[in-house]
Image (cartoon, helix red, strand yellow):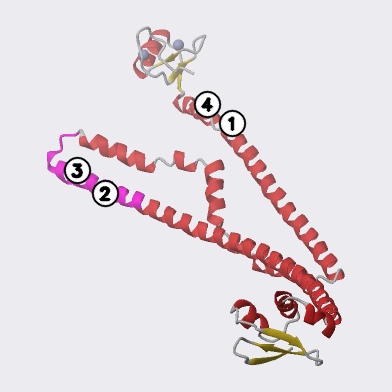
Amino acid sequence: MEYKCSYPDCQEDAFWECSCSGNLKNCDTHSRTHSKEKQCLTKYVKNYYMELLTKKYQNALNRLESDSIKLAQEMINEVNICLRNNFDTIKSVKQKIKELVFNDSKDQAEILTDFANSLFIMRRYKKDFVLSVEKLLGFKKYFDKDDLVSEYHEDEFEFENVTTFEEAFSKIIEIKKDLKESYEKNKILVEEFDVVRHNLVLENEEFKLENFELKNELYKLKVTLSNYDKVSEEFNSNTTENLIGEINIDNFSTLLLEKKKELIARMDFKDFSRDFIYKKWFIYQINLTTIKDHIFICDKLSRLYVLCR
Ligand SMILES: [Zn+2]
Ligand SMILES: [Zn+2]
């Protein structure tokens, strides 16, 4: 859209339109010459031209506007998906709690509840989201030219020969530069602090998750251990009874000393294992008495040990 004067070799803007055929457009000077010559009417079209020009430039922003709407819609969809996932998770955890309670696994249901109670999503670092939104969707900062405009004017000033203000002005620029640098440094520090804070929040959540998993593991271990204890108790009582049954005066006296020690260690006589197995106190002889819960042990110096269960 060119609004240049119709006169050959004239490069001036043409804001005057005449009534001749073709509605010639001329600059201020040539419009006067032309209408005097042709006796035609002229009208001032600068505002109309400005309107058209404005529209032309503004149209360039329409694509950006429609892209903004599309991208924002996609982001809103992501938020909705995440929210739906949360609802689904809550529903399935509630169901799991019900199953655990009905399967007499109250402890595990409690672990799940404790973990849920330890999650405070409202305390999460929302600034991250705001920054992401700004980074992905925003472009305001690119059009925020205030600083650039003032800098531009400052540059213009520098080329002027106003010596009386020159020194003062360069000082102002220097101060502004320092201020800008301080602001940048401060911004970096704040960002670093935010990152540290954010990491702490994440670590805390990871710690809670680890804690939750550990609690679960502990619970499983407890269950395994209690099962093992039952089996072990059964085994021991069987073994002890068998041993007591096995031992009688006839066959015990015929056993080797080591075999006797082994049998007695398994029968859990008080301090027997500690003193005679681990500390290796010397045993000269072990004799069985008629009292099944007692044993008499004789050492090299004929000292007698009486042990009971
Ligand atoms: Zn004319
Ligand atoms: Zn002209």
The verdict on residue 165 being magenta is yes
Sequence-first tag of 2 and 1: 1
Res. 70 image quadrant: top right
Q: Which residue corresponds to mark 1? A: 63
Closer to the camera in the image, 209 or 27: 209
Q: Residues within 10 Å of mark 1 (few under 14, many from 20)?
A: few
Q: Residues within 10 Å of mark 4 (few under 14, many from 20)?
A: few
Residue 251 percent location from the top left of the image: 83, 79
Mark 4 and mark 2: Cα distance apart in space = 41 Å
Magenta span of residues:
160-185
Three-letter code for the amino acid on which mark 1 is drawn:
Arg
Closer to the camera in the image, 202 or 276: 276
Residue 17 percent location from the top left of the image: 46, 17
Establish if 67 lies above or below 188.
above
Three-letter code for the amino acid on which mark 4 is drawn:
Lys
Establish if 173 lies above or below 91.
above
Three-letter code for the amino acid on which mark 2 is drawn:
Asp
Q: What element carries label 2?
A: helix
Q: Is label 1 or label 4 in front?
A: 1
Q: Do the residues labelled 3 and 2 touch (CB within 8 Å)?
A: no
Mark 1 C-beta closer than 8 Å to ligand 2: no
Per the rendering, the mark at residue 238 is none
Sequence-first tag of 4 and 2: 4
Q: Which residue corresponds to mark 2? A: 178
Per the rendering, the mark at residue 170 is 3
Residue at (52% x, 31% y) in the render: 58
Residue at (60% x, 78% y) in the render: 280
Mark 2 and mark 1: Cα distance apart in space = 39 Å
Three-letter code for the amino acid on which mark 3 is drawn:
Ser
| Left/right of residue 135 with respect to residue 256 in the rendered view | left
Q: Which residue corresponds to mark 4? A: 56
